[in-house]
Image: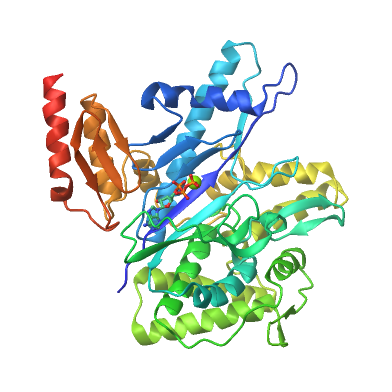
C-alpha cells in the first residue's frame, strides 16, 4: 500500500476581549503571546520538540504547522497538540496581561474569518507523486474540493450584503481561483507553488488552501481522509468520469450558501449535478477502487463514515452528521439557541455563538464542551493527544528531527532546522538533508547526533 505524508497548518485568530477596561490590540497581544517562544527558541519562528513549526508571520495570527504524519489519526493528534500548545501560551499571556493591569481575557479561535472580514487559512499538505500531471489532478480534485464543504465545512453565520444566513463554508467567500501559484494575491483552492520539502524528482507537496479549519475530530478525519482517497484514485490512473464544474468558484459559493435547497451545479460539458451527487460519485469510485485494490483499516473507516454522512444528507437523517461534521453540529446549537431565545437569523448573539464554537480553550469553547459531553465523536485517545504535545510522529522523518532538536536543546547546542535540513551551527559539515519524508533510521542523523554530543560535552 502506498504511504502518504500529511501536514496541517492552522492560523489562529487572536483577541483580547475584556468586559471592561483597556483592550490590547491583536499585534501587541501576539508579541506578548510569543514572548516565551522567543525566550526559549530565540525566534518567533521555531521548530518544537514534537517536530512541528510554530511561528508568527506578519500580522497577528499565530500559526502551527504539524509535523509530517502518515496517518489521519496521527494528524488529528498532532493538530490537537498544536491547539494545546497555543492555548497554554494564551494562558501565560493572560497572566502577563493581568500583571499589567488588563483584564486577562485572551482568546484563540480556530476559525478562518475575523469580525472585520479578514480570512486566514487552514492549509492541507499531501505528499503526491511528481509524475502526476497537474491538469489531470485538478480536473478531479477541483470538483471534489468544490463539493467537500458538504461533508467537511465548519459552518457559519454570515451577515453579508446578501442578508444574514447560514453557510457551510465561511472560507468559500474568500477564494478567487481554482488553481494558482500565489497564496495571498489571488487565493486559490489549490496552491501550486512548487516546494516539495522532499526529493523533488520523486515528489510534490500538494497544498490545498480552500478548506475550513476543523474543530470536530470527525470533520478532520473526513476532510483529510476523503481527499487522500481521491488522490489515490488519481495517482493510480483510474478512469474517472469527467465531472469538471463549469465555474468552480461560483459553484463553491453556491454549495456553501445552499444548505437546505441545493441548486444543481453546471458542469463543463453542459450537464448539471448536485454537490451531493458529485460527492456520491467520488465515494462510489473510491469504494470500488479500495474493494478491488485493497485498503488500510483507516481508509475503510473513512469510507464507512463518508458513506454514512452522505446517506444522512440524502435521506434527511442524522445518524452521524451532527456528531461528526462541524457545520451540522454548529447548526443544531444555533437552531436550538435561536428557538429558545426567539432570535432572528441575523441576531448578533448567533454570531457570538458561532465564534464560541471555535474558541480552543477546553471547557470554554463550545466544540470542546460538545466533545467532552460525547456529542462530538473522537478518533484519538486523550493520552495520545497529550503525548503529541512533546512527541513527534514516530513513523516519519519528524521522529529524527524531534530527537535531534531535543538532544541539541538539552546540550544547549544551537541548530538550524527546516522541514528537510538539520544542522549544528558550530559544525558546518554536520548538515543532513532528509529528503525522504518516510526516513526514520537513526543512522541517517548519526553524524549530527555525534556532533551534538561532542559539543554538549565540550560546553
Ligand atoms: N514532503 C511533504 N509532503 C507533504 N507535507 C509536508 C511535506 N513536508 C512537510 N510537510 C508539511 O507541510 C507543512 C508545511 O508547513 P509550513 O507552514 O512551513 O508551510 P509552507 O507552505 O512551507 O510555508 P509558509 O506557510 O511559510 O508559506 C507542515 O504541516 C509539514 O508537516
Ligand atoms: Mg505555513
Q: How many marks?
A: 0
Residue in view at x 56 percent, y 45 percent: 368
Give me the residue at 51% from left, 65% from top.
222
Instruction: Indicate left or right for 438 with 88 as reference.
Output: left
- Quadrant of the image containing the C terminus: top left
Q: Is residue 325 visible?
A: no
Q: How is the image coloured?
A: rainbow
Q: Is residue 301 above or below residue 436?
A: below
Vertical side of 350 occupied by 275: above or below: below
Above or below, 115 against 438 in this view is above
Task: Residue 399 in the image: state x and y as whole percent.
Answer: 26, 47
**Quadrant position of residue 212:** bottom right
Q: Position of residue 299 (x, y in %)?
A: 40, 71
Judging depth in this view, the residue of 339 and 29 nearest the camera is 29
Q: Position of residue 456 (x, y in %)?
A: 16, 25
Q: Quadrant of the N terminus?
A: bottom left
The residue closer to the viewer here, 378 or 410, is: 410
Residue at screen point 50% across, 74% down: 137
Horizontal side of 165 relative to 73 (left or right) equals right
Is residue 360 shown to the viewer in this render?
Answer: yes
Q: Residue 360, position in %: x, y?
A: 56, 40
Amino acid at each position: 500500500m502506498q504511504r502518504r505524508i500529511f501536514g496541517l497548518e492552522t492560523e489562529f485568530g487572536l483577541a483580547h476581549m475584556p468586559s471592561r477596561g483597556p483592550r490590547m490590540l491583536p499585534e501587541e497581544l501576539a508579541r506578548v503571546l510569543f514572548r516565551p517562544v522567543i525566550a526559549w527558541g530565540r525566534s518567533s519562528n521555531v521548530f518544537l520538540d514534537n517536530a512541528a513549526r510554530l511561528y508568527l508571520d506578519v500580522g497577528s495570527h499565530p500559526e502551527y504547522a504539524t509535523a509530517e504524519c502518515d496517518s489521519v489519526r496521527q494528524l488529528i493528534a498532532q493538530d490537537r497538540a498544536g491547539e494545546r500548545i497555543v492555548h497554554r501560551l494564551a494562558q501565560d499571556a493572560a497572566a502577563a496581561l493581568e500583571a499589567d493591569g488588563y483584564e486577562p481575557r485572551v482568546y484563540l479561535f480556530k476559525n478562518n474569518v475575523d469580525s472585520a472580514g479578514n480570512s486566514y487559512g487552514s492549509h492541507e499538505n499531501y505528499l503526491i507523486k511528481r509524475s502526476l500531471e497537474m491538469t489531470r489532478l485538478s480536473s478531479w480534485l477541483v470538483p471534489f474540493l468544490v463539493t467537500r464543504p458538504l461533508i467537511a465545512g465548519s459552518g457559519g453565520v454570515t451577515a453579508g450584503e446578501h442578508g444574514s444566513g447560514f453557510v457551510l463554508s465561511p472560507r468559500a467567500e474568500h477564494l478567487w481561483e481554482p488553481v494558482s501559484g500565489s497564496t495571498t494575491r489571488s487565493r486559490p483552492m489549490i496552491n501550486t507553488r512548487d516546494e516539495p520539502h522532499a526529493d523533488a524528482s520523486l515528489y510534490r507537496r500538494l497544498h490545498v488552501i480552500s478548506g475550513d479549519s476543523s474543530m470536530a475530530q470527525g470533520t478532520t478525519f473526513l476532510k483529510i481522509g476523503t481527499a487522500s482517497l481521491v488522490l489515490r484514485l488519481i495517482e493510480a490512473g483510474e478512469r474517472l468520469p469527467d465531472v469538471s464544474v463549469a465555474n468552480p468558484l461560483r459553484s463553491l459559493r453556491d454549495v456553501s450558501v445552499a444548505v437546505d435547497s441545493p441548486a444543481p451545479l453546471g458542469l463543463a460539458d453542459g450537464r448539471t449535478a448536485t454537490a451531493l451527487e458529485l460527492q456520491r460519485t467520488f465515494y462510489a469510485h473510491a469504494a470500488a477502487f479500495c474493494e478491488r485494490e485493497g485498503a488500510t483499516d483507516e481508509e475503510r473507516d473513512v469510507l464507512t463514515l463518508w458513506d454514512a454522512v452522505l446517506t444522512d444528507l440524502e435521506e434527511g437523517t442524522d445518524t452521524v452528521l451532527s456528531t461528526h461534521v462541524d457545520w451540522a453540529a454548529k447548526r443544531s446549537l444555533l437552531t436550538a439557541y435561536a428557538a429558545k431565545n426567539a432570535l432572528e437569523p441575523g441576531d448578533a448573539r448567533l454570531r457570538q455563538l458561532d465564534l464560541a464554537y471555535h474558541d480552543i480553550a477546553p471547557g470554554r469553547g463550545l466544540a470542546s464542551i460538545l466533545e467532552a459531553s460525547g456529542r462530538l465523536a473522537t478518533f484519538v485517545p486523550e493520552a495520545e493527544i497529550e503525548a503529541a504535545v512533546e512527541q513527534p510522529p514516530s513513523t516519519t522523518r519528524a521522529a529524527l528531527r524531534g530527537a535531534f532538536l531535543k538532544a541539541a536543546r538539552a546540550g544547549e547546542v544551537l541548530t538550524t532546522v527546516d522541514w528537510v535540513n538539520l544542522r549544528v551551527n558550530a559544525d558546518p559539515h554536520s548538515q543532513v538533508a532528509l529528503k525522504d519524508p518516510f526516513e526514520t533510521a537513526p543512522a541517517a542523523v548519526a553524524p549530527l547526533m555525534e556532533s551534538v554530543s561532542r559539543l554538549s560535552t565540550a560546553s
